[in-house]
Image (spheres, helix red, strand yellow):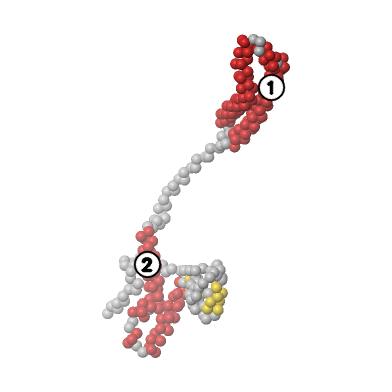
Amino acid sequence: MDILKSFSRRIFLWTFFFMTILCVLVNAAFYLGVGFFFDALPIQALKDAAAQSDVLDAGLAKILPVLDIFYSFYIPVISAVFFLFFIILWLVLRTSMARALKKSSFAEPPVPAKKEKKKKMPADPMAEPAMTKKEIAETNKRFYLQLLSVLQREGRLIDFFSEDLGLYEDAQIGAAVRSIQDNCKNSLKKHLNPKPVIDQNEGETISIPPDFDPNAIKLTGNVTGEPPFKGILRHKGWRAARLELPTLSVVKDPSVMAPAEVEIV
């Protein structure tokens, strides 16, 4: 919580400041007190008196080492004690502040509202049912066959591919191909309207930009380095300017591309 961190830092700094001032005052008072004590009762005078008294000499021999140790380690020990009190006091104040902040409303993060579950709308009885993956695949196959059916119906394309051209003269084949080509061309223009990918004359030198589409432009020959490239246009390519798929009819066998025709006599 940002508020708790901010208060915690402030409490830490102010507590450290006041405990440091208090530690300095206590150590200064100790030094002043010890100095006043030794001024009032000089150690050298006690040593001179102890030279004439065995009892006093034995007492000084026990007290003086303790005074030296106490005098040498008083400041580090008192400083450590104050530091320990500082840590304890800071933790107590921080814990109390955290409890107080938890009870207050502004410290608690806003509870996100539960998202209402979207109610499922009742299915529309007039809507078409969703198609399965298998049905989608079958539909795509039917569209492919339907396009071939259109080319067969309007241009007799499958008949032309199935015919044995070795039985005919070149002139007969040329006349038949002209009619088939015109009819198939009109069908493609109606449903796909093919347009060139690169609308330039084949054989011309063209420049390929760096951001070219590899699916639309196929590079051949000595392709090295990074684009842009310069090359000769060998084929302009084709793209569908229109995608008007034929309407699928309800048939018993969707694999039939062209029905057989029987004249009843």
User: Label for residue 31?
Assistant: 1
Q: Marks 2 and 1, how far apart in space?
A: 105 Å
Quadrant in the picture for the N terminus: top right
Task: Say which of marks 2 and 1 sits in front.
Answer: 1
Q: Nearer the viewer, residue 205 or 45?
A: 45
Relative placement, left or right, of 115 versus 47 is left
Residue 254 lies in quadrant: bottom left
Residue 169 visible in the shown view:
yes
Residue 133 is tagged as none
Viewer-nearest residue: 74 or 144: 74
State the residue at coordinates (59%, 37%): 2
Q: Where is residue 5 in the image (x, y as percent from the top left)?
A: 60, 35
Q: Which of 30 and 224 is in front in this view?
A: 30
Residue denoted by label 2: 142
Using a 10 Å C-alpha cutoff, classify the residue at mark 2 as few (fewer than 14 neighbours), some (14 to 19) or many (20 or more). some
The image shows residue 255 at horizontal and vertical percentages of 33, 69
Q: Is residue 70 visible?
A: no
In the rendered image, which quarter contains the C terminus?
A: bottom left
| Residue name at image x 55 percent, y 79 percent | 205
Q: Is residue 173 above or below residue 32?
A: below
* Residue 163 in the image, given as x and y percentages of width and height: 33, 82
The quadrant where residue 105 appears: top right
